[in-house]
Image: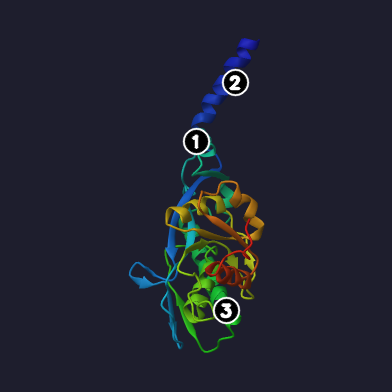
Amino acid sequence: MLAGCGVAFAALLGVAAFAPLPFAVTEPGMTADVLGEHEGEPVISVEGAETRSAEGELRMTTINATSPEATVRLSDVVSGYLADDRAVLPRESVYPVGDSTEEIREHNEEQMRSSQDDAVAAALGYLGRDDVEVELNLSDVGGPSAGLLFSLGVVALLDGDGSGGDLTGGQVVAGTGTIDADGTVGAVGGVPLKTHAARDDGATVFLVPRDECEAAEGNAPDGLRLVPVDTLEDAVASLRALAGDGDAVPSC
């Protein structure tokens, strides 16, 4: 009887090893400096106002995930759980809308467009500026997670640190977070992987939505300072402080 159960269990494991599973495997993706160029064009273009030259960098971060049509097997899940530079997530948490790559691409592009509009509104509202036209160009990145960095980029180009200096203090700053038109920063997911992407591209500071501090701390690479933010105002204040002695800047 026991021998029969053992054979059956082994057979089930054999089937599970080759059966597709409802997970996605994710890894650190590309980063892009919103103060620079992407594919030969400025990421942020401004008309109707004078802009500043940036000394440092503000890098938005991404993750890569297996496509919704990809077959993820038990071996992929196990290796993903054991790796520091990968994560295994339920497929519906990575792709909550749509069943095909095309449907998901269209959804992500719509989210990005809405996020960009909110980012510009938040930045101009924070600065009290009117009659300024801002165009954002990062067409091959979808979703709303670059909102905070877009807003900071607009502030950096129009106002710097507010006192004649560079908002980044010449540092490579990265981060993630959605943003509402009123400047509220929201959580995004995938933060541990994004911290590794940021560090790989030279960042020493990472701005993280406060609610995701614990997740970011769990797997943060050495040499990367995690700074929690709730609002655009928080983020600007922390960057200004970092450009000074940095003692008053909160950390995760």
Viewer-nearest of discs 2 and 3:
3
State the residue position of label 3.
121
Q: What x and y, as percent, mark residue 222? A: 51, 49
What's the amino acid at mark 3? Answer: Ala
Crowding near the residue tagged with mark 3, few <14, some 14–19, many ≥20 C-alpha atoms within 10 Å: many
Q: Is residue 52 left or right of residue 185?
A: left
* Residue at x 51%, y 42% (from the top left corner): 84
Mark 1 near mark 3, Cβ–Cβ under 8 Å?
no
Q: Nearer the viewer, residue 143 or 199?
A: 199
Is the C terminus in the top left, top right, bottom left or bottom right quadrant?
A: bottom right
Secondary structure found at label 2: helix
Task: Work out which quarter of the rendered image holds the N terminus and state it.
Answer: top right
Badge 1 local density, few (<14 within 10 Å), some, or many (20+)? Answer: some
Rendered location of residue 170, percent (x, y): 45, 68
Q: Which of 235 and 123 is in front in this view?
A: 235
First in sequence: mark 2 vs mark 3: 2
Position of 53 with respect to 248 (left or right) is left
| Element class at badge 3 | helix
Q: Specify whether residue 190 is in view.
A: no
- The circle on residue 9 is 2
Q: Position of residue 135 (x, y in %)?
A: 45, 78
Disc 1 target residue: 79
Separation (CA) of disc 2 from disc 3: 58 Å
Q: Which colour scheme is used?
A: rainbow
Residue 71 seen from this side: yes
